[in-house]
Amino acid sequence: MPALHRHYDLPPLAQLEAFEASARHLSFTKAADELALTQSAISRQIAALEEHYALPLFRRLHRALRLTDEGQRLYQAVVDVLGQLHDVGVELTRDRRVKTVIVTTTPGFAGLWLIPRLSTFTAARPDVDVRISAAYELVNLNRDGVDVAVRYTKVDGATLPGERLFGEVVFPVCSPKLAREPARLLKRPEDLQRHTLLHQESDDQNQLQSWSMWLRAMKVEGLKPASSLHFSAYDQLIQAAVNGQGVALGRSPLIDDLLRQRKLIAPFEKTMASARSYYLLQSTAAARKPEVQEFIAWLRTEIEADAAAQAGTRIRITPARRASA
């Protein structure tokens, strides 16, 4: 069976470009200037096109051009087709130039720290597609095609070949409105018994930030709160605190922006140092991707700016061993 073949009865593209420019300007001279050709070359292209269709496309008046009815129909079709070809070409070129940075991290780091700052990177590099996967499950960066991981792990047992970004400290936080309630003022840790405590579901990731450990460090481990609320993700828990639904254990620097904006406050000065830190890991391919290295450089700059801003806050960081003394 012979292969199917469709023949398109089309004139050369150069003739159509010459016609489109001439029809738009209604001038062979202006069309020639736009296409960097001579007027005679444009005239020859139009004559060949009219010969192809065996009909006149222009009415040549004294020092003026007018499209014939047939020329007007062809002009509209040519504009549509050339426009579509141009748009498709732009999309195909853009698709080839798409640069991606794939990041995996915890929901808390993504929702509270990374995403609120991300616009500064995307504004500087709008051509880079940043893709964030927020989950507690660890992935194999090289196998799963991930460029960067920011992982939350113990300081003492860290065997990851990564770069430490920052540690964190833990302390109670709540909304300013909740802290000002006259009947439930928060002046001492013992005052938490009149409030709802917000908890994250216990797992290996957040056990060190549990209320039981903080209350033990403050020597009020037998405290019974008015009620409790539990959440599966840390950013959900913090949003509940912002909304005045209870008191949460804040983790600095994840919540530093909320403290600076006064959406949250720390009613007590004492804090507890976390045994975990955030580490940066890169895939093998990341070193060969300039956009990934730019993202990492931006990440370090944001962390440095955070550290400088934190130095000016009123929160006093007390190591856990001193807090429990």
Image: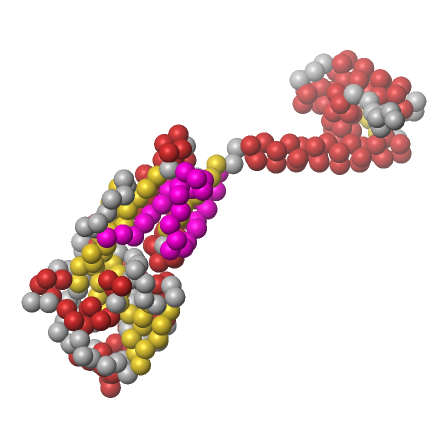
Q: Is residue 96 above or below residue 252?
A: above
> Is 294 placed left or right of 15 in the picture?
left
- The answer to whether one can see residue 163 in this image is yes
Residue found 48% across the figure and 36% down from its top: 99
Question: Does residue 66 show up magenta in the picture?
Answer: no
Residue found 67% across the figure and 32% down from its top: 86
Residue found 18% across the figure and 79% down from its top: 222
* Furthest residue toward right: 54
Q: What percent of the width, then of the height, locates residue 103?
A: 40, 45
Image: magenta residue range: 127-154
- Identify the colour scheme used: secondary structure
Q: In this view, does 1 lie above or below 88?
A: above
Q: In this view, does 255 lie above or below 90?
A: below
Q: Quadrant of residue 147?
A: top left
Along the line of sight, the residue nearer the viewer: 228 or 99: 228
Question: Does residue 144 show up magenta in the picture?
Answer: yes
Quarter of the C terminus within the rendering: bottom left
Residue found 26% across the figure and 80% down from its top: 225
Q: What percent of the width, then of the height, locates residue 285?
A: 40, 33
> Is 73 placed left or right of 245 in the picture?
right
> Is 325 placed left or right of 19 in the picture?
left
- The answer to whether one can see residue 180 in this image is no
